[in-house]
Image (spheres, rainbow, N blue to C red):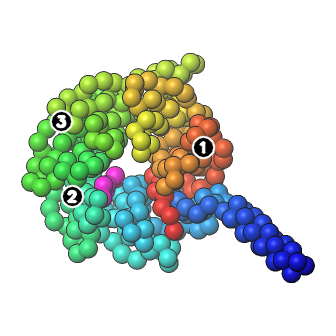
Amino acid sequence: MKEDRLRMWRYCLLSGMAFLLATAAPASAFIAYVSNEKSNTVTVIDTDSWTVTKTIKVGQRPRGIEFTRDGKFVFVAVGDDDSIQVIDVAKQEVVDTLPSGPDPELFALDADGKMLYVANENDNTVTIIDVEKRARLGEIQVGVEPEGMAISPDGKILINTSETTNMAHFIDTTTRQIVANVLVDARPRFAEFKRDNSEVWVSSEIGGTVSIIDPVKRVVTDKITFNIPGLRSEAIQPVGIGMTKDGKTAFVALGPANRIAVVDAASHKVTKYLLVGQRVWHMAFTPDEKYLMVTNGVSNDVSVIDVAAQKVIKTIQVGELPWGITIAQP
């Protein structure tokens, strides 16, 4: 009887310890990489501790940035060096370059991670790169000052936005030909598909709107406008867009308005504005979508947003003129 009680006590003790360890164990840490346009660096942030763990020296004027599909490398567009640099995540240093064409800005990686489509701002083209072969396959002539890049969920259509032509170009990824040009408001900067392929959202910085485009009919079906009391309309300049996987909520960076707009993605109505740092540019969700991190170009920091609570919980200092951000699980 005494031995039974002893075994039971040991079992309870071990079970309690296992429970405490399970509940106390931190969630899987995610790693964020931030491109700093002026300091020519990439800042590495541990999202478990919300601290900077490394600053990586890269080429001149880094902007677009994204993890490879396997999470082993980070691509960063270095505009003034006319290339895409490759950062080895394990080594946390630049180990290779890809031939991007002149002044690369934003780019899109296909679902398999084999093809990279790069907007080359200075020569009005989209360059196609074979990632495995590190080879340039060709280019597509688009409008003036191409920037925004997005691939449809089925991989069949590539969207490129041209800032001066004020268009969203629909490009067939098989034929590599433009199949439609959709006129939007002035200076389109970014494009984002809904996961169900029902809509494409395109932000227009000077126009102050986000155009909602039907990707089948290829027409603008609605526009989102923004109104912040006390701010002139000229100060509200939509740029980056982030959308939850369920397609219910979108977040739009409003540039010098220093706000993130929270938008009901079904009704296209703004539900809230979140005050962040100065000159907010781009954003990225942690893979579990608990947090959204946004880059603030003038205040040289990153704001961390609790997605469920829809509030800013942290500010992290990074390099000069932070522009792009990408996040992956290590």
The stretch of residues the image draws in magenta is 104-109
Q: Residue at x 21, y 58 (%)?
A: 127
Disc 2 to disc 3: CB gap under 8 Å: no
Going by the numbered disc 3, the residue's amino acid type is: Val
Q: What's under tag 1, amino acid-wise?
A: Asp
- Prevailing SS of the magenta stretch: strand
* Image-based side of 139 in relation to 57, left or right: left
In the rendered view, does 303 fall on the left or right side of 70?
right
Image coordinates for residue 145, horizontal then vertical, percent: 26, 44
Give the numbered dot on residue 216: 3
Residue 312 shown left or right of residue 40 in the figure:
right
Q: Quadrant of residue 100?
A: bottom left
The residue carrying pointer 1 sits among few (fewer than 14), some (14 to 19) or many (20 or more) residues within 10 Å by Cα, namely: some
x then y, percent, for residue 155: 22, 53
The residue identified by callout 2 is 127
Task: Indicate which disc, 3 or 1, sits on the residue closer to the N terminus.
Answer: 3
Give the left or right position of residue 224, taking residue 118 as reference.
right
Residue 150 vertical placement versus 231 (above, below): below
Q: Which mark identifies residue 306?
A: 1
Q: Residue at coordinates 31% horizontally, 54% vertically from top-left?
A: 107
Marks 1 and 2 close (CB-CB < 8 Å): no
Identify the mark nearer the N-term, 1 or 2.
2
Q: Circle 1 sits in a helix, a strand or a loop, which is it?
A: strand
Residue 13 placed where, x, y %?
Answer: 81, 71
Which label number is shown at residue 162?
none
> Within 10 Å of the Cα at label 3, are there few (<14), some (14-19), or many (20+) other Cα atoms?
few
Q: Secondary structure beneath disc 3?
A: loop
